[in-house]
Image: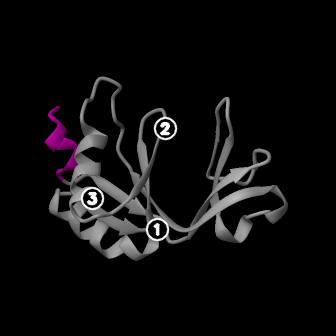
Amino acid sequence: MKLEDYFKNGKVYIWKEKFSVIKAKKIDPNAFANIIDKNEITVIIEESKVNQEDVIKIEKGWKIITFDMILPFELTGFMAAVSKVLAEEKISIFAISAYSTDHVLIKEEDFDKAKKKLEQMGCIVVER
């Protein structure tokens, strides 16, 4: 399948909750994602579930966009295509790849512009 085929009628969910991206003291079992590298722990969590005691730095007001499609490892350019169309609208992203799908965090104020751009790519975008 060609790259464009993944966008044509591809399902995309925008989470209704607002999320925070945190530089944290420890992982959080309630998080959407915990990213652990040799320098820091990043926690992505619903704003209502943030434990302030674990926060070193925090960025609030993010929405998660989930590409609800199985993306094979050999697929190239998927995230590049997404980031390009969003960058054209000056939309900053925080990208996360899971085993078979991708997620992008955008600021809440960019929600409408991002939705419109993804729909122009052929995606079916719904809030969940």
Residue 112 percent across, percent down from the top left: 31, 75
Residue 33 appears at what percent x and percent y?
62, 47
Q: Given this view, does label 3 or label 2 mark the residue nearer the observer?
A: 3
Residue 52 x %, y %: 80, 65
Rendering quarter of residue 54: bottom right
Kind of residue sitting beneath label 2? Ala
Mark 1 residue type: Arg
Q: Is residue 85 left or right of residue 16?
A: left
Q: Which residue is mark 3?
A: 86
Residue drawn at x 73%, y 65% as measured from the top left: 49
Closer to us: 44 or 124: 44
- Coloration of the structure image: one colour
Magenta residues, as a range?
A: 1-8
Residue wearing tag 1: 128
Marks 1 and 3, how far apart at CA: 21 Å
Please give the residue where the numbered disc 2 appears in the rendered image: 98
Q: Residues within 10 Å of mark 3 (few under 14, many from 20)?
A: many
